[in-house]
């Protein structure tokens, strides 16, 4: 059992890591998009305020 | 009745303009012939091997040639805003769609009819042993290809990168249709009339055609007009 | 309120997952032939379930958009499609790692693998199509039509590939056969946290779509000067 089971456990870990890595990558893309949207909204708002101030 | 005449008018217009300019037809036909030639380098075309994969080979050629043809189907109407005129004309969008699909179907069938003898000569295959069944399979599967292809031609007509988008979206959609066509064609070229499994494939092909024709007719109005 | 729901769901999902992994490793015996690796199934199969559920919701949302023309439906459709693709990728990759051990190969053209891959490509096309359209209403409309067409073709893909691949001798024969009750409970039990995660992802993504619309409005306002 010992050796074979150990090897399988290793690949089980790889499998689980892969699953969560994919979801993590998706979450990261979500987060980066969130930041980008926030930045753009901020800069546009500032631009509009500036123009209205003049 | 009026509806059918409208669809036929659109089909006749498309066929006429295509047969006069031959721009898509020439490109598509020469492309098909070149691929047929190239396949002979991809594998050693011995008689048995060719017979085993004849369906796959032929339908890959037809699918590639079809994409070229279908790309032009709606894109052709972009010049001089012809598409806007067609959409605003009293012809319903679904009749417009059916007419275009019919024209594409006839053109693609024409290409297939030219390719088959060339295939027979190049690969030394007697493909005429089940002519009636082969004609039926060609007609059904080509309709499947054209109905999906014309739908996506309408869907992608106003997009950037239209030429890339169409094949990328169409080929995964066509997998069931092409697979049925490949299975049936391989058996028919080998001279077997459809039986057992082959009939199930044929039924699936018919179902595919009916469902996607109905769905496209129902949805094309939202695509073209919104 | 929304934040609260998100955090509660997230916490619940993490707790459930921790409990499930604990039970998986300590409570459930190894499968007779496969040893420890079979535990991948508790993520592999629920990921596929989640993926298809997401695509189904995307279909409903697409129909909803075409019926009502409300952008919320479109936001739901794109969010569920993206989440579905993420879970579909998780399913494919975990399956490949599992296959490497049990079958000795990374990939085989077995019908299940092939049809999952085709589905994934179909819905990846959906995202590519969305990127190519600028105008929001047109984008939503075309994407909705594509989603409906894609969902319709999925059963055809499944059956055709199944027929095709079972007509040939398969390189590897593997059937799930009967499953132990404890395993089955764990299979469905682990679906719950994955579903919760999917819901969280969809909610976050929908909020982003809303903000993207805001951004669009601001842009127009800025250019109107």
Image (cartoon, helix red, strand yellow):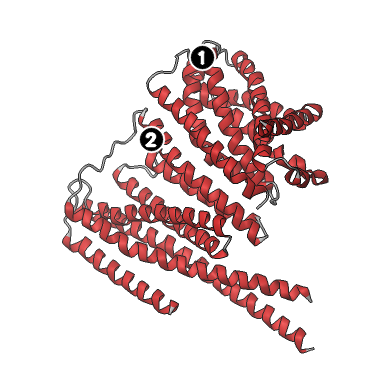
Residue C209 % position (x, y): 56, 67
Residue B29 % position (x, y): 70, 26
Q: Could you tell me if residue C114 is visible in this image?
A: yes
Disc 2 sits on a residue from what chain? C
Disc 1 sits on a residue from what chain? B
Q: Is residue A40 left or right of residue B54?
A: right
| Residue ranking furthest to the bottom | A53
Q: Could you tell me if residue B34 is visible in this image?
A: no
Q: Is residue B141 left or right of residue A22?
A: right
Residue C15 % position (x, y): 29, 72
Residue B75 vs C82, above or below: the answer is above
Residue C135 % position (x, y): 67, 60
Q: Tell me how far mark 2 sits from mark 1, CA to CA.
A: 28 Å
Secondary structure beneath disc 2? helix
Q: Is residue C164 left or right of residue B97?
A: left
C136 or C13, nearer to the observer: C136
Residue B63 vs C207, above or below: the answer is above
- Residue position marked by numbered label 1 in the rendering: B47
Report the disc number at residue C49.
Answer: none
Mark 1, Cα crowd under 10 Å, few <14 / some 14-19 / many 20+, is: few
Residue C136 vs B187, above or below: the answer is below
- Residue position marked by numbered label 2 in the rendering: C162
């Amino acid at each position: 059992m010992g050796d074979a089971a150990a090897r399988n456990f290793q690949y089980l870990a790889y499998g689980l890591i892969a699953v969560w890595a994919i979801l993590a990558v998706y979450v990261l893309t979500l987060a980066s998009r969130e930041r980008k949207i926030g930045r753009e909204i901020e800069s546009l708002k500032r631009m509009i305020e500036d123009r209205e101030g003049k | 009745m009026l509806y059918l005449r409208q669809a036929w008018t659109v089909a006749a217009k498309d066929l006429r303009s295509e047969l006069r300019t031959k721009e898509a037809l020439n490109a598509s036909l020469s492309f098909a012939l070149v691929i047929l030639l190239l396949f002979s380098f991809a594998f050693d075309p011995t008689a048995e091997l060719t017979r085993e994969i004849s369906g796959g080979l032929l339908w890959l050629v037809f699918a590639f040639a079809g994409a070229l043809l279908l790309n032009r189907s709606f894109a052709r109407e972009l010049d001089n805003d012809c598409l806007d005129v067609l959409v605003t004309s009293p012809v319903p969008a679904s009749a417009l769609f059916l007419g275009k699909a019919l024209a594409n179907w006839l053109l693609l069938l024409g290409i297939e009819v030219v390719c088959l003898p060339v295939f027979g000569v190049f690969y030394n295959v007697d493909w005429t042993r089940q002519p009636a069944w082969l004609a039926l399979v060609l007609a059904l599967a080509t309709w499947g290809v054209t109905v999906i292809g014309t739908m996506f031609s309408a869907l992608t007509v106003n997009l950037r990168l239209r030429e890339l988008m169409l094949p990328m979206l169409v080929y995964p959609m066509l997998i069931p249709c092409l697979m049925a066509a490949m299975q049936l064609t391989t058996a028919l070229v080998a001279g077997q009339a459809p039986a057992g499994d082959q009939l199930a494939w044929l039924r699936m092909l018919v179902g595919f055609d009916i469902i996607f024709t109905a769905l496209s007719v129902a949805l094309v109005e939202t695509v073209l007009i919104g | 309120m929304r934040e609260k729901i998100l955090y509660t769901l997230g916490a619940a999902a993490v707790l459930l997952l921790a409990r499930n992994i604990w039970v998986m490793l300590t409570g459930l015996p190894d499968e007779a032939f496969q040893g420890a690796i079979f535990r991948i199934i508790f993520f592999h199969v629920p990921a596929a379930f989640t993926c298809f559920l997401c695509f189904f919701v995307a279909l409903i949302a697409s129909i909803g958009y075409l019926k009502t023309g409300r952008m919320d439906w479109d936001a739901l459709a794109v969010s569920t499609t993206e989440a579905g693709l993420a879970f579909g990728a998780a399913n494919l990759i975990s399956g490949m790692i599992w296959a490497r051990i049990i079958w000795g190969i990374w990939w085989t053209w077995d019908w299940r693998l092939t049809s999952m891959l085709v589905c994934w490509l179909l819905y990846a096309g959906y995202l590519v199509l969305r990127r190519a359209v600028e105008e929001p209403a047109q984008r939503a409309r075309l994407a909705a039509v594509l989603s409906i067409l894609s969902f319709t073709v999925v059963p055809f893909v499944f059956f055709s590939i199944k027929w095709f691949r079972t007509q040939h001798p398969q390189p590897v024969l593997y059937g799930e056969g009967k499953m132990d009750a404890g395993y089955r409970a764990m299979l469905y039990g682990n679906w719950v946290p994955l579903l919760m995660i999917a819901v969280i992802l969809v909610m976050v993504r929908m909020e982003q779509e809303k903000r993207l619309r805001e951004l669009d409005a601001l842009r127009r306002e800025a250019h109107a000067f």
